[in-house]
Amino acid sequence: MVNGLVNAGYVTRTRPPEDKRSVLVGLTDAGRARHRQRRQALAEALHGDLADCDEDALDRVAEVLHRLSAVYPRL
């Protein structure tokens, strides 16, 4: 995955001189721009697709997603 992001120009990868076992991955300006684009696209999609949901429904969904997120670390 990191190789693909490096090849796309979204991240850089460097090895710290004090620990050759680790790799530092940093976001590039292009990566930041792409993240902003994706975040905006997601916000627009969710705004349109969830516009008919009331606040209570969204709160219930958020609670379920929060609970599901607790499951993943145990897998």
Image: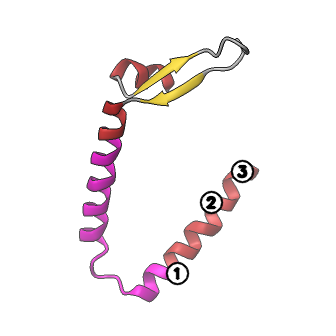
The Cα atoms of the two marked residues, 3 and 2, are separated by 8 Å
Q: Main secondary structure of the magenta part?
A: helix
Query: Where, by quadrant of the figure, is residue 16 drawn?
Result: top right
Which secondary structure, mark 3? helix
The region drawn magenta spans 34-60
15 lies above or below 53: above
48 lies above or below 56: above
Q: On the image, numbered disc 3 is attached to which residue?
A: 73
Q: Residue flagged by tag 3: what amino acid is it?
A: Pro
Residue drawn at the location 23% of the way across and 69% of the way down: 48
Q: Nearer the viewer, residue 11 or 3?
A: 11
Which class describes the residues within 10 Å of circle 3: few (<14), some (14-19), or many (20+)? few
Q: Residue flagged by tag 1: what amino acid is it?
A: Arg
Residue drawn at the location 26% of the way across and 54% of the way down: 41
Residue drawn at the location 32% of the way across and 56% of the way down: 42
Give the x, y percent position of residue 21: 72, 15
Give the x, y percent position of residue 63: 57, 75
Give the mark nearest the N terminus, 1 or 2: 1
Left or right side of 11 for 46: left
Q: On the image, numbered disc 2 is attached to which residue?
A: 69
Q: On the image, numbered disc 1 is attached to which residue?
A: 60
Give the x, y percent position of residue 58: 44, 79
Q: Residue flagged by tag 2: what amino acid is it?
A: Ser
The Cα atoms of the two marked residues, 1 and 2, are separated by 14 Å
- Residue 45 lies in the magenta-colored region: yes
Residue drawn at the location 73% of the way across and 15% of the way down: 19
Q: Nearer the viewer, residue 6 or 70?
A: 6
Which class describes the residues within 10 Å of circle 1: few (<14), some (14-19), or many (20+)? few
